[in-house]
Amino acid sequence: MYLAANVAYFSWSSDKKVRTALQETNNVVSETISYHEGQWDVSSYVNSKLSHTGPLYIVTVDGFVIDRKNIINGLLDVSDYRFSSSFQLPQTLTTPAGQRWRLYSKPIFSNNVVVGVITTGYAQPEFSSAEEIDSQLQYAASEILSQINVTPTIIDVSQVKTTSVSNKIAFEVVNKFNQVLESSGGLPSYIDRSYVSKYLKQGFETIEDKETKEKYLVYFSPFYKNSSQPVGFIASGYSLRQVRKDLYTQIAFSLTAGVFITGFMLISITTLLKKDVPAFLEKKQNKQEQKCKGFSFNKKSSIISIGNKQLKVPFASNQFCVCKVLFSNPQKRWEYDEILEKGFGLDSFEEVKSNWRKIYDAVRAVNEKSKEVFGQEVIISEAKTFQVSSDNHVKNIESN
């Protein structure tokens, strides 16, 4: 029973954490990209330090790829071959996202027949010499071509090393069937609009890589930005392989822990039966009281107190609900979606997204009152988490 419950909880908890992380990634991307009357501005996104390391796609409804990282084979791994091969003489291009690129295309031949193209690019070329940039682009394309094995039917890119190319150079290898074989650096490219329409949705989908067979949980969210119709979409993914590894480790740990816990319980029960139970309970209660020194919250009277100082919280208010959750485990750092779920019964994505503000307002109201009564904030807010003020803060109050 213990093992089954532990594994079930871990599976649910892991899935929730992955889904929350993907939602937060899409939200961050959406907040750092602006769109107004047909004009895109991705400067804030380019300069942001996005922590997400899994697959990521940002595509407009016209099929322009703003960014595409760690592609899942079979998911939007296409690129317009005609566009990619149209820079055999180096050219400067301003993308729909307002970025300037210097681009160069080098055809891939098999028996004197073009079977693909290598496109290299340099962002913001106005800051360097055009001749120097063109030389770097052509050298990078030749270096990549030397690592490609070409047969009449296959362009083998398995030996291509991104480290052999300057990190200032982005590149993409595309065959004549519009399939992206290798890419690095977010080079400007286009996807046929017919591929885009099916992904203008919001929700999760499990997708398997057609080559590696690795499964990913992918979160799709439309991009609106002052428009009733979506102007693009964001998709972020997370490999489920690591989740499974963690789950198997947890199962093994749970089996071992279950044996030890069972033995420990048997020993503990035997020991308790030999002792004075009331004395034992009283001693345990005294230890808990010493451990819990600091702020306390009485749900019946709706009062926060420390020593002889008391703060009345409006009963059944948002402030009351937040305090009830936080004081249920004062040592825990609570995230706002956990508070909404446990204190308000809100757990869907849309409910959390539309109600997160009430948590911040309630915390601010409690802290404003507590500074007047206690001379210190009761609730600490940090990095979207909330926690009852620690014992160190309490000592500071009592010494005043």
Image (cartoon, rainbow, N blue to C red):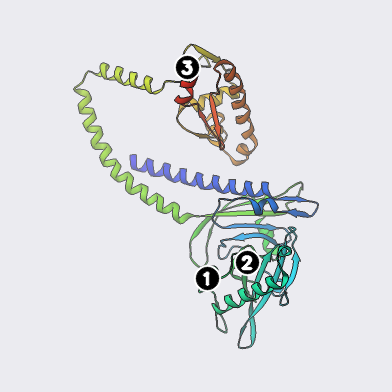
Tally of marks: 3
- Disc 1/disc 3 C-alpha distance (Å): 62 Å
The image quarter in which residue 110 lies:
bottom right
Relative height, residue 96 to residue 368 (above, below): below
Given the image, on which type of amino acid does mark 1 rest? Lys
Residue 251, how many percent across, how many down? 35, 48
Q: Nearer the viewer, mark 2 or mark 3?
A: 3
Q: Secondary structure at mark 2?
A: strand
Residue reaching furthest to the left: 274
Residue located at (56% from left, 18% from top): 375
Tell me which label, 2 or 1, sits earlier in the chain: 1
329 displayed left or right of 173: left
The image quarter in which residue 341 lies:
top right
Q: Secondary structure at mark 3?
A: helix
Residue reaching furthest to the top: 308
Disc 1: which residue: 161
Residue 252, how many percent across, how many down? 32, 49
Task: Tell me the number on the disc at residue 398.
Answer: 3
Residue reaching furthest to the right: 37
> For the N terminus, which image quadrant?
top left
Q: Nearer the viewer, residue 85 or 194?
A: 85
Task: Tell me the number on the disc at residue 170.
Answer: 2
Residue located at (64% from left, 33% from top): 357
- Disc 2/disc 1 C-alpha distance (Å): 13 Å
Given the image, on which type of amino acid does mark 3 rest? Glu
Tell me which label, 2 or 3, sits earlier in the chain: 2
Tell me which label, 1 or 3, sits earlier in the chain: 1
Q: Secondary structure at mark 1?
A: loop
314 displayed left or right of 97: left
